[in-house]
Image: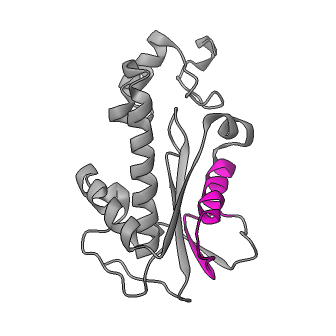
Amino acid sequence: MLKSCYRTLFEAGTDEAGRGCLAGPVTAAAIILPEKFSNSVLNDSKQLSEAKRDSLRPILESKALSFGVCHVFEEEIDQMNILNASILAMHRALDQLQKQPSFIIVDGNRFKPYADIEHCCIIKGDGKYLSIAAASVLAKTHRDAYMAKIHEEFPMYNWKKNKGYPTKEHREAIKKYGLTKYHRKSFKQLPNQLTLDI
């Protein structure tokens, strides 16, 4: 059973999606839920079907006191590395909140201070706290929608299905067609990286 943390009323949960992908952005969401919010379906986005995530997105966006979603794209990921890009995405999502949170709970174990607001990192927090789970669903659904959109431009990589993750199908397409503008050039795209012309 997920629970509320609520050290303060305006507590934001934040999480990211797409950190381990070969292509596309890393996407983060931040959300402030009402104090008495509950939902029997909401869980870590990885534990939910695509249909359940998609059905939750409009509920979360309509019920939230405030939320923000941000993509950090390939060029910035390559410039600063994926950890820093993930934290930047969370900061930019927090920037979008119409209400400034008085406390931030973060999925994982790494974060950088944001606007002098106290924060707490929680390992596997998306399976423990409602606001982090909600952020994980928003980050995942917004990123999946973006990957489905760019799939239309490069259908041979099947991003609509694999979302840019390093599946065998995705890597076979990279071998055959090379890299696109959406691929992260700093990532090891293939096991035999030295033979790939990037």
Q: Residue at x 52, y 36 (%)?
A: 24
Task: Give the quarter of the figure containing the C terminus.
Answer: top right
Query: Measured from the top left, where is residue 65 in percent x and y?
Result: 47, 76
Task: Give the quarter of the figure containing the N terminus.
Answer: bottom left
Q: Residue at x 67, y 54 (%)?
A: 88
Residue 61 visible from this viewpoint = yes
> Is residue 96 a member of the stretch shown in magenta?
yes
State which quadrant residue 122 falls in.
bottom right
39 to 145, vertically: above or below: below
State which quadrant residue 35 falls in.
bottom left
Query: Measured from the top left, where is residue 166 in percent x and y?
Result: 45, 32
47 to 144, vertically: above or below: below
> What span is in magenta?
83-111
84 to 113, vertically: above or below: above
Query: Measured from the top left, where is residue 8 in percent x and y?
Result: 56, 89
Q: Is 55 on the left-hand or right-hand side of 82?
A: left
> Is residue 94 a member of the stretch shown in magenta?
yes
Query: Measured from the top left, where is residue 162 in percent x and y?
Result: 37, 34
Q: Is 110 on the left-hand or right-hand side of 171?
A: right
Residue 163 visible from this viewpoint = no
Q: Residue at x 64, y 58 (%)?
A: 92
